[in-house]
Amino acid sequence: AFMQELRGVSYLEEQIRNQFQLQHVIVVPGDSDELSWGKQEMGKACVRYLNDILSTDDTIAVTGGGTIAEVANMMSPLEKAENCLFVPARGGLGENVENQANNICAKMAQKANGDYRLLYVPDPLSEEAYQTIIEEPAVKEVLQLIKSANVIIHGIGDAITMAKRRKTPADVMKKIEEGKAVGEAYGYYFNEEGKIVHKVRTVGIQLEDIQQANCVIAVAGGKSKAQAVASYFKQAQCHVLITDEGAAKELIKGS
Ligand code: G3H
């Protein structure tokens, strides 16, 4: 039965890799919608993968969310990659502190024996404040580090779940609903075809940066996130997906 399980998972990995033209896919057993330890398993798998690919002096940008928080929880000293620098990919996006990129980034760096820089910016921001803040030398320096990151690790969320969790104002909520957004990643909301329905104005990584990055790792699982993951892949380039069986089985149904 165990061998059958293993074959099952590697079949899913291969299918998804081909379907979405990814470089690498890891599927962990179970469905994190139902299992309390599902996100931890994806976190562990992500840490193992990072241990394989990271080199000394690499810069890693990380987003927020409960899944990436589990990557931080599972992090251990990076033996082969000394002196790594962790930066938050984007601002807080209106999340509670435990789900904010700054907090997760600092924790990940400490556990990895690495270094970190933080983004001290309030957000979401007005256009005027945004333009002023991105010119601040301290912010500029971190933004440059973010844009030069070798590896980007991010979560993907169900659009409505994310908008509600971030206490999105009513007018924006309406835009997200009327635009039929189904997926969300680093503050961008996507519809089923992958079109951008809304984007939260905050400093940090923009979709253009993602399109140019060398190694983008998405970590997202649970059957309820399958549609979100598929919508995101229609728009953004991503190299690696770390997911679970719950999302994976649903993802290949659409092929
Ligand atoms: O952008 C997506 C969210 O950060 C995902 O959050 O990992 O808590 O579901 P989550």
Image (cartoon, rainbow, N blue to C red):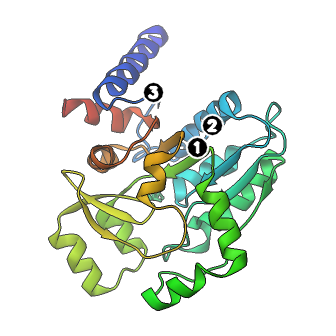
Disc number at residue 199? none
Q: Is residue 117 left or right of residue 24?
A: right
Q: Which residue is mark 1?
A: 40
Displayed quadrant of residue 81: top right
Q: Which residue is mark 3?
A: 23
Q: Residue at x 43, y 35 (%)?
A: 244
- Disc 1 marks a residue whose amino acid type is Gln
Displayed quadrant of residue 9: top left
Q: Label 3: few (<14), some or many (≥20) within 10 Å?
A: few
Look at the image and tell me in which quarter the N terminus lies.
top left
In 3D space, how far apart are the residues under numbered discs 2 and 1 (Cα atoms)?
6 Å
Q: Which residue is mark 2?
A: 44
In 3D space, how far apart are the residues under numbered discs 3 and 1 (Cα atoms)?
23 Å
Mark 2 or mark 3: which is in front?
3
Q: Is residue 217 visible?
A: yes
Mark 3 or mark 1: which is in front?
3
Q: Residue at x 68, y 44 (%)?
A: 74
Where is residue 240? Give x, y as percent: 48, 35
Where is residue 196? Give x, y as percent: 27, 62
